[in-house]
Amino acid sequence: MDRIDYDDAGNLDDVAIENVRMFRLEYMDDNRIWIRLYRDNKPDLVFHLEAAGKIAGSHYED
């Protein structure tokens, strides 16, 4: 089951999405990130992340 929760201030807090065919993340500039989750038989989901300063990213395999 998909879950998108917001905190009391209206900010994204916890996101869990099932059955994503493709995940795409793109830095728009230093403090904005665009994310699109492509899904079969459901609408795609789009997220915009913004910060006051530069957003640093990293990844690891688990």
Image (cartoon, rainbow, N blue to C red):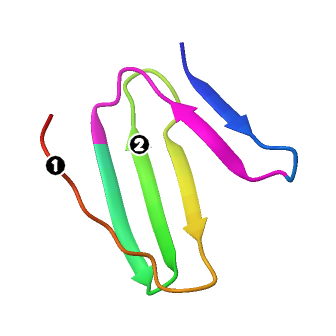
Identify the residue under disc 2: 37
Q: Local crowd at mark 2 within 10 Å, few (<14), some, or many (≥20)? A: some
Q: Position of residue 15 (x, y in %)?
A: 55, 35
Q: Is residue 48 magenta?
A: no
At 86% across and 53% down in the image, what residue appears? 9
At 15% across and 34% down in the image, what residue appears? 62
> For the magenta stretch, what is the residue range?
10-22
Q: Secondary structure at mark 1?
A: loop
* Three-letter code, disc 2: Leu
Q: Position of residue 61 (x, y in %)?
A: 12, 41
Q: Position of residue 5 (x, y in %)?
A: 70, 34
| 53 on left or right of 17 | right
Against 5, residue 28 (above or below) is: below
* Three-letter code, disc 1: Tyr
Against 15, residue 55 (above or below) is: below
Q: Local crowd at mark 1 within 10 Å, few (<14), some, or many (≥20)? A: few
